[in-house]
Image (cartoon, rainbow, N blue to C red):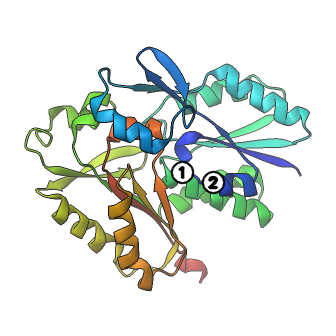
Amino acid sequence: MNIALVTDSTCDLPSDLVTAHKIHVVPNILVMDGRSVEDNKEFTRQDFYTQLPDMATFPTTSTASVGTYQALYEQLFSDGYDQVLSIHCSNELSGIFNAVSTAAQSVSGQVIVIDSRQVSLGLGFQILEAIEALNQGVSPDSIAARLQHIRKRLRLVAMLDTLEYVRRSGRVSWARASLGALLNLKPFVEVIDGKVLSMGEVRTRKKGIARLLEMMQSPKPLKRFALLHTNAEEDARRLLETLAPDMPTIPLLVNVTTVIGAHVGPNGLGFVALLQDESHQ
């Protein structure tokens, strides 16, 4: 059976992996000064984060249209694919899942839509696991159940430089009431079951990096690992150098895509870890 895999640009998968696995990535939309720009088009992530603090109007984000997904699905079926597996950002954080679900119901072939309950490489790693499962002969209908099990072994944690961008976005209810931004603290967040939850804060970036390092050095068997940042590559590389001797897998280093970064702000640091399934060791 010929199966196409579709996702959106919040997956943060590097372009070489997207190309190698023939993943169809639909860009989300960044709205700047009333102008809509596709994610990762027209400017680099580095340029976006450099300019973000000085932007007169706070950028907003939106999903690609239902029609965009519908046209892609129809094209894939026209190209000879039998089924489409479409895996996307958490429904709690974006309208992407609703757009995709509507598009899937209106096309001529079978589209299996999965809410990853994650974002960034919390989503991206699930896509790689889905590809691995398909290569093992697991049916597309069974992938959703497998990913639900895999999500229990996923962890995405981030230290933000400020809470201001999360607060402005309005996507996280507790952030609107928090005093963290006013007190100049460094908030920690974790994505759990599709929601961004507070993990408290630290008073300095140095303490925050030490806390991240402690969490990343916990003795757990890793299958996949990534360091995430929003234009904080120097700090991220230093963390990688510290972790390298004990890292059992080749880590990814990713400057997070702009439609996520607009809600996070520059100088964020974080990680995504997928643990080995020890029940199958």
- Circle 1 sits in a helix, a strand or a loop, which is it? helix
Which residue corresponds to mark 1? Answer: 123
Mark carried by residue 127 = 2
| Quarter placement of the C terminus | bottom right
* Disc 2: CA contacts within 10 A as few (<14), some (14-19) or many (>=20): many
User: Could you say where residue 65 lies in the image, as x and y percent from the top left?
Assistant: 61, 22
Task: Write the residue at 10% across / 56% down.
Answer: 203
Q: Which of 49/184 is in front?
A: 49
**Quadrant housing residue 212:** bottom left
Q: Amino acid at mark 2?
A: Ile
Residue 234 lies, in percent from the top left, at 35, 62
Q: Using the rendered image of the protein, determine whether residue 157 is visible from the camera's viewpoint.
A: no
Taking the spot 13% from the left edge, 49% from the top edge, the residue there is 185
Say above or below: 207 vs 89. below
On residue 213, which mark appears? none
The front one of 235 and 88 is: 235
Circles 2 and 1, Cβ within 8 Å, touching? The answer is yes
Residue at mark 2 to residue at mark 1: CA–CA distance: 7 Å
Q: In the displayed image of the protein, which residue is found farthest to the top?
A: 34
The residue at 84%/27% (across/down) is 108
Q: Residue 207: x, y in percent?
A: 16, 65
Q: Callout 1, which amino acid?
A: Leu
